[in-house]
């Protein structure tokens, strides 16, 4: 592989990286606009429900894993 083709390959790879990052940024921008436009009053109870479920299932269960479990015979 020549030095020139190696440089061209690196440039092509960097160009693909930039295009991929731009697509990700556009998707995040679209999500941001969607979140800003939803009727928050209508979604309030639904969001509270899902956040409570997330907290119960993920956060609290994760806390239990961090705590040491008592062993038999020790008090």
Image (cartoon, helix red, strand yellow):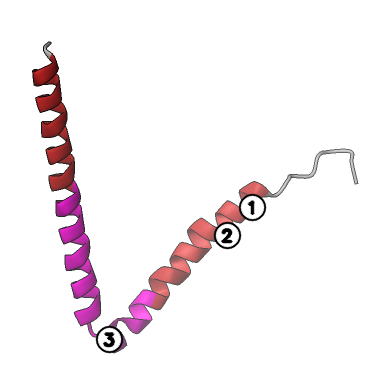
Residue 47 location, quadrant: bottom left
Question: Is 75 on the left or on the right of 35, as rendered?
Answer: right
Q: Decide: marks 1, 2 in contact (CB < 8 A)?
A: yes
Image position, residue 8 (x, y; %) = 9, 26
**SS class, disc 2:** helix
Residue 38 location, quadrant: bottom left
In the image, the segment drawn in magenta is 21-47
State the separation of the CA atoms marked 1 and 2: 7 Å
- The relative height of residue 6 versus residue 43 in the rendered view (above or below) is above
Dot 2 alpha-carbon crowd within 10 angstroms: few under 14, some 14 to 19, many 20 or more: few
Image position, residue 4 (x, y; %) = 9, 19
Q: Which residue is mark 3?
A: 42
State the separation of the CA atoms marked 3 and 1: 34 Å
Residue for point 16% across, 45% down? 18
Give the label on residue 35, or none: none
Q: Which residue is mark 1?
A: 64
Image position, residue 24 (x, y; %) = 20, 53
Tell which circle, 3 or 1, labels the residue nearer the N-terminal end. Answer: 3
Q: Which residue is mark 2?
A: 60
Residue at the far top: name it: 1
Question: Is 28 on the left or on the right of 41, as rendered?
Answer: left
State the separation of the CA atoms marked 3 and 2: 27 Å
């Amino acid at each position: 592989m020549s030095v020139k083709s190696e440089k061209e390959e690196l440039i092509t790879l960097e160009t693909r990286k930039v295009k991929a990052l731009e697509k990700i940024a556009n998707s995040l921008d679209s999500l941001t606009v969607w979140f800003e436009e939803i009727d928050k009053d209508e979604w309030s109870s639904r969001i509270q429900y899902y956040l409570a479920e997330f907290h119960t299932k993920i956060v609290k269960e994760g806390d239990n894993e961090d705590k040491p479990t008592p062993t038999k015979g020790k008090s």
